[in-house]
Amino acid sequence: MIPLMNLDRQYASLQEQLDEAALKVLHSGNYILGEEVTEFEKEFANYCGVKYAVGVGNGTDALIIALQACGIKPGDEVITCAMSFFATAEAIGIVGATPVFVDCKKDTFVIDSAKIEEKITNKTKAIIPIHLYGQCAEMDEIKNIAKKYNLKVIEDAAQAAGAEYKGKKAGAMGDVGCFSFFPTKNLGCAGDGGIITTNDEEVYKQCLALRVHGSGMNGLFTYGKRKNIDVSEENIDFNGNLPKYFNFVLGHNSRLDALQAALLRVKLPHLENWNSIRRNFAAEYNDKINNAVIIKPVCGKDSLHIYYVYVILTEHRDELRKKMDEEGIATGVYFPVPLHLQKVFEDLGYTEGDMPNAEYLAAHSLAIPMFAELTEEEINKVVEVINGFER
């Protein structure tokens, strides 16, 4: 079977370094936060071109904490794209806000920025553009809209570590960026992991507090922000106790493990090369796939795509998927149900037909094998089966 993604091959290519990094952490006895996390945060912030990064438990927590750090609260509305992994909208709902969905573009699959402004109300407080499949949303247009209406921009960059828009890295263009290090991502750890990026020191301090139960001096700072009072000069006597036992706001237990940070530190220097290899493979697919019933993905003129997944469209998706399975080629669907039609959001009143592009993508898209360790033989086999598919 030619896999859709493969983790074994990447591990094998870095086994000695990864094993050494893991054993170093195990021998240290320091497993939660600590030096490995601090150093990875610095390295990832530098990679993205931002001042600060905060490691958290996973990409979903990154979104939730970022929303809270940006002041999003119950009763607010947050605009996002109808085509994404569920966590994007779930995070909005968990903080008590209402997700407001906008359709994606039919060619690049990212949020249609031309349709955002019509969804803005006096309750709208933020926009979450999704850098879907490894391609950045049209951030200039989105940021202009946000500036006009004084909205926060929270980038969902879960699938886009290393992607660029007009030369700027994902996670460096909005008020906050949110990443996932789920193992299958272009930069993945050996379990769950995530990170928040920002240039805003106040947001940074709040994220630090929120990932550890709203405690310590950063928790006090966050308390002051929410109460609109100056606590910068306030002296807190911990009476010899650890600051983590003094809680000022409700937060989360969401910390990036030292083990995961150590593994990510080994992998990060390879990310640019891995992304470049993926682009080369995508170019091969674009060049060699010539079946008339297949629509190949489009890369926007201002985007540097990292191809977390390579997604084709066809009216005969299910038949092609069956054929590829018979030929020993794994495929995937990202994602079979657009967010506005998920059962959990039925009370929002969306119906089939409201987001035609997202609905078409959900019904006709197919991800084919894409990872940096694919072989030329495997790529040619995938192309051969797709080109030989007949209807």
Image (cartoon, grey):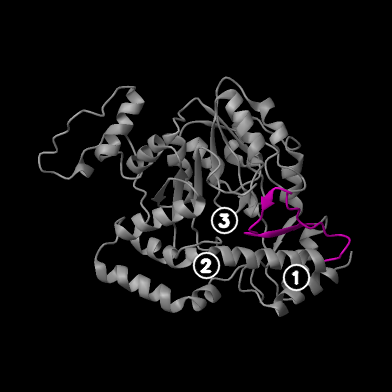
Whole-Å distance between the Cαs marked 2 and 1?
31 Å
Residue identified by numbered label 1: 324
User: Which mark is nearer the camera, 2 or 1?
Assistant: 2
- Range shown magenta: 289-313
Amino acid type of the residue tagged 3 in the rendering:
Gly
Tag 1: amino acid: Met
**What element does badge 2 sit on?**
helix
Of the residues shown, which amino acid type is indicated by label 2? His
Q: Which residue is mark 2?
A: 270
Within 10 Å of disc 2 (Cα), the crowding (few <14, some 14-19, many 20+) is: few
Left or right side of 212 for 245: left
Element at label 1:
helix
Is residue 187 part of the magenta span, yes or no?
no
Residue 181, percent across and down? 49, 57
Corner quadrant of residue 117: top right
Q: Earlier in the sequence, mark 2 or mark 3?
A: 3
Q: Residues within 10 Å of mark 1 (few under 14, many from 20)?
A: many
* Residue 257 visible to the viewer: no
Q: Identify the residue under disc 3.
A: 162
Task: Tell me which numbered mark, 2 or 1, is placed earlier along the sequence.
Answer: 2
Q: Earlier in the sequence, mark 3 or mark 1?
A: 3
What separation in Å lies between label 3 and label 1 (alpha carbons)?
30 Å
Quarter holding the C terminus is: bottom right
Secondary structure under badge 3? loop
